[in-house]
Image: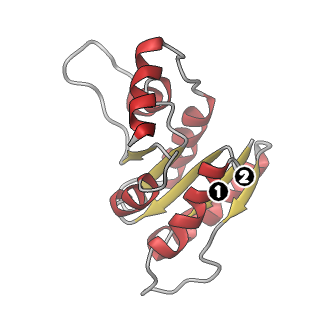
Amino acid sequence: MKIAVSTDHAGFEAVKQLVSFLEEIGHEVVDYGPKEYVATDDYPDFIRPCAEAVASGECEVGIIFGMSGQGEAMVANRVKGVRCGLYYGKQTAHSDQSEDPYEILRLNRQHNNANMLSIGARFVKFDEIKEAVRIWLETPFSEDERHQRRINKIDEV
């Protein structure tokens, strides 16, 4: 799979590690920067080109980082054709019997066919990032009609 990655200063080290991990497990990675650490950089400068690569089909999916990941997800989701979810770490659902701490990642792909994932680098250690990314990449879209109908409505906006 061809994967776009990007960050700002907050995820600079994490994205380097992620590139190595993704290549080790057989993926092609395109890094949209930054190429060097600059504490005052602005995440939209790097996240938007990454999201555009996903939207255009140049890359199949994208993984982005920021301190919280929120602003980065907002930038990505402004690009038509991008559906970016946000990950802060393991969670367990309160309202049902699920004990899967990665359920939110699976639902992100199964129900929303997310093509980008934003990770809050300040909240997730790298060992968990690797597992989360692996699960997210391996989880297919359910292709359920109701989910596709909703995605079509998102893409109309």
Observer-nearest of 148 and 101: 148
Check the image and tell me how it is coloured. Answer: secondary structure
In the drawing, does residue 41 fall left or right of residue 49? left
Could you tell me which residue is drawn at 37 percent across and 62 percent down? Answer: 122
Q: How many marks?
A: 2
Amino acid at pointer 2: Glu
**Residue at mark 1:** 53
Q: Label 2: state its secondary structure.
A: loop
Could you tell me which residue is drawn at 46 percent across and 83 percent down? Answer: 41
Quarter residue 108 falls in: top left
| Residue 134 visible | yes
Where is residue 45 drawn, in percent x and y? 51, 75
Residue 138 higher or lower than 23, as above or below: above
**Nearer the N terminus, badge 2 or badge 1?**
1
Q: Contact (CB < 8 A) between labels 2 and 1?
A: yes
Quarter of the picture containing the C terminus is: top left
Q: Mark 2: few, some, or many residues within 10 Å (few <14, many ≥20)?
A: some
Quarter of the picture containing the N terminus is: top right
Residue 12 higher or lower than 41, as above or below: above
Q: Label 1: state its secondary structure.
A: helix
What residue occupies the far front of the structure in this picture? Answer: 156
Residue 38 higher or lower than 130, as above or below: below
Where is residue 32 drawn, in percent x and y? 64, 68
| Residue 102 visible | no
C-alpha separation, residue under disc 2 versus residue under disc 1: 5 Å
Could you tell me which residue is drawn at 41 percent across and 61 percent down? Answer: 75
Observer-nearest of 77 and 71: 77
Where is residue 29 drawn, in percent x and y? 73, 55
In the drawing, does residue 152 fall left or right of residue 46? left
Where is residue 70 drawn, in percent x and y? 33, 58
Could you tell me which residue is drawn at 39 percent across and 47 percent down? Answer: 86
**Residue at mark 2:** 58
